[in-house]
């Protein structure tokens, strides 16, 4: 997966930071978005992030850190 790829969440993932439902459990299964960043370094130092893919979802200005096994590519960039 690369920055710019269109992706869909293919498993049940519950988040608590949805802009319209703060603090409530929201399942984002089947939501679509675009890979915005891949977390490989921070302040010039390499990191090994547990959830390295930052996905920007189409609705509600939502961004979430995801793992590659939680996503499927719809259209590569």
Image (cartoon, helix red, strand yellow):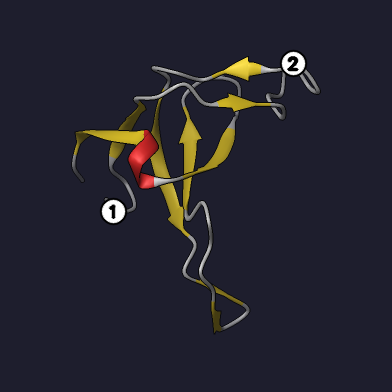
Q: What residue sits 59% from the left and 30% below the top?
A: 62
User: On screen, 28 above or below 7?
Assistant: above
Q: Residue furthest right?
A: 23
Disc 1 to disc 2, how far (Cα)? Answer: 29 Å
Residue 69, quarter of picture: top left
Which quadrant of the structure image shows residue 74? top left
* Mark positioned earlier in the residue sequence (1 or 2): 1
How packed is label 1: few (under 14 Cα within 10 Å), some, or many (20 or more)? some
What's the residue at 44%, 18% (across, down)? 29
At a point 40% along the width and 24% down the height, the residue shown is 11
**Residue 5 placement, left or right of 56:** left
Q: Are marks 1 and 2 in contact (CB under 8 Å)?
A: no
Residue 8, x across and y down, in percent: 34, 27
Question: In this picture, is 71 found above or below 16?
Answer: below
Label 2 SS: loop
Task: Determine the residue positioned at 34% across, 52% down.
Answer: 3
What is the crowding at mark 2: few (fewer than 14 residues within 10 Å), some, or many (at least 20)? few
The residue at which mark 2 appears reads as 21
Q: Left or right: where does residue 60 sit relative to residue 57?
A: right
Out of 18 and 68, give the one closest to the viewer.
68
Q: Is residue 24 depicted above or below 49 in this figure?
A: above
> Farthest left residue?
76
User: Residue 52, percent across and down?
Assistant: 47, 56
Tell me how many marks there are. Answer: 2
Secondary structure of the residue carrying tag 1 is loop
Rendered location of residue 18, percent (x, y): 68, 24
Residue 65: % across, % down? 54, 45
Q: Which residue is mark 1?
A: 2
Looking at the image, which is closer to me, 4 or 72?
A: 72
């Amino acid at each position: 997966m690369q920055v710019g790829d269109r992706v869909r969440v293919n498993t049940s993932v519950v988040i608590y930071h949805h802009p319209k439902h703060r603090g409530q459990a929201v399942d984002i299964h089947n939501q679509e978005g675009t890979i915005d960043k891949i977390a490989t370094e921070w302040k010039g130092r390499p990191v090994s992030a547990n959830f390295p893919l930052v996905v920007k979802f189409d609705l509600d200005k939502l961004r979430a850190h995801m793992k590659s096994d939680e996503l499927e590519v719809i259209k590569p960039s």
